[in-house]
Image (cartoon, helix red, strand yellow):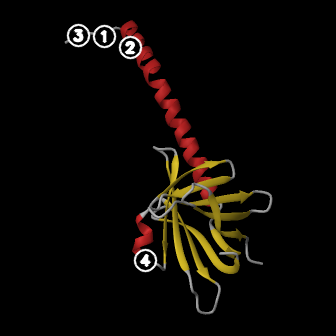
Amino acid sequence: MSIINRSTLSTSMGVAMLLFAPLASQTHADAQAADDDNAFLNQLQGTWDMPGTFGGKPVHYHASGERVLQGGFLRLHMVDAEPKPQYEADVFIGFDAQRHDFIAHWLDRFGAAGARVVATGKRNGPRLVMTFPYTSGAFRDTFTFVSDTGAWSLLLESQEPNGTWSTFATYSLTRPK
């Protein structure tokens, strides 16, 4: 059995602190980023009025956002405001703290074929850009939070074969009056 004196213990603890301090501060920075990114998503919670355009024609949805699966995802549920809805979708968005990015699953009335692709994206301030790499051409969804009004905009774009992006749909999400 060896005896460790205070000087050896103090030196060993100092070395350990030097080795692990960057990991601890990185973990704190990661946790703060995850908190900020989850707080960003939390602003989508609640009930929304969602007018917009699809294919250049006016559309109107009702939407609601809520945390689901023990808070792991924000689910945005959208349904056509028509008496006999033609469209309904759930978008599940979550933040991956290990990869420092967001993922999204878009599930809608068209079934499983369109749900095979998972989007990834990054947030830059009030804007979250998610890209769905479909084999027939990528889609890009841009969620933008307007902090002074508490509203959101959602721009859906499709990528053309030549690499350019064109507007597929646009929506504004505001609190119902």
- The first of marks 4 and 3 along the sequence is 3
Q: Which mark is residue 12?
A: 2
Measured Cα–Cα span from mark 3 to mark 2: 15 Å
- The structure residue drawn at horizontal position 79% and vertical position 62%, both measured from the top left corner, is 149
**Location of mark 1 (residue):** 4
Cβ atoms at labels 2 and 4 below 8 Å apart: no
Cβ atoms at labels 3 and 2 below 8 Å apart: no
- The structure residue drawn at horizontal position 65% and vertical position 85%, both measured from the top left corner, is 81
Q: 10 Å neighbourhood of mark 2: few (<14), some, or many (≥20)? A: few
Mark whose residue sits in front, 3 or 2: 2
Q: Nearer the viewer, residue 53 or 92?
A: 53
> As drawn, is 156 to the left or to the right of 28?
right
Split into 4 quadrants, where in the image is the C terminus?
bottom right
Cβ atoms at labels 1 and 2 below 8 Å apart: yes
Q: 10 Å neighbourhood of mark 3: few (<14), some, or many (≥20)? A: few
Q: Secondary structure at mark 3?
A: loop
Q: Secondary structure at mark 4?
A: loop
Name the residue at the bottom extreme: 83
**Location of mark 3 (residue):** 2
Residue 38 drawn at (x, y percent): 57, 53
- The structure residue drawn at horizontal position 62% and vertical position 54%, both measured from the top left corner, is 128
- The first of marks 1 and 2 along the sequence is 1
Q: Secondary structure at mark 2?
A: helix
Q: Is residue 54 above or below residue 20?
A: below
Measured Cα–Cα span from mark 1 to mark 2: 10 Å
Mark whose residue sits in front, 1 or 2: 2
Cβ atoms at labels 3 and 1 below 8 Å apart: yes
